[in-house]
Image (cartoon, grey):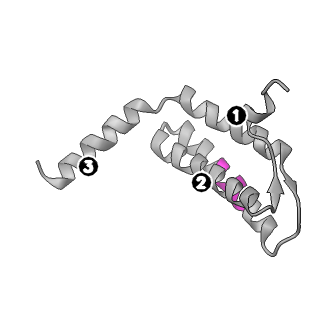
Amino acid sequence: MSRKGSEGHRSTKIRRTISQEYLQTYFENMRVAMESLRINRKAEGIHEIIDWVKSYYSDAEVFAKRSDLVSALAAIAYCEGILEALRLLGLVSFSWKSESTKVK
């Protein structure tokens, strides 16, 4: 099988394993994170970076509406990764949905 043919097969297989319901867990997690987002310390470009996160989130919504679930998952994963990096640097704080629903 040619490389081109195997790539197409893999892409089809991936699409079958990503559902709208699966993506909704990511959207809900990001919604909770963005609602709880707090800037801990000012850093050059922090607001622009947060705007990128919002743009990726918006892109993910558009991709999901178009049933491009692979691109939607990639965009929402960028959101999570950027926020987590900012948190690890101590620049922001927020809660993931799973953290906000834990019994204390």
Disc 1 packing (10 Å; few <14; some 14–19; many ≥20): few
Disc 2 marks a residue whose amino acid type is Tyr
Asked whether residue 25 appears in the rendered view, the answer is yes
Q: Are marks 1 and 3 in contact (CB under 8 Å)?
A: no
Q: What residue is at 20 percent from the left and 53 percent from the top? A: 4
Disc 2 marks which residue?
A: 78
Type of amino acid at the residue the image marks with label 1? Glu
Distance of label 1 from label 3 (alpha carbons): 31 Å
Q: Residue furthest front?
A: 104
- Say which element carries label 3: helix
Q: What residue sits right under mark 1 in the picture?
A: 28
Mark 2 → mark 3, Cα distance in angstroms: 23 Å
Residue at image location 37% in from the left, 38% down from the top: 14
Mark earlier in primary sequence (1, 3)? 3
Does residue 72 appear left or right of residue 33 in this picture? left
Q: Is residue 40 above or below residue 31?
A: below
Q: Secondary structure at mark 2?
A: helix
- Magenta-drawn segment: 51-57
Prevailing secondary structure of the magenta residues = helix
Please tell me the numbered disc located at residue 5: none
Residue tagged 3: 7
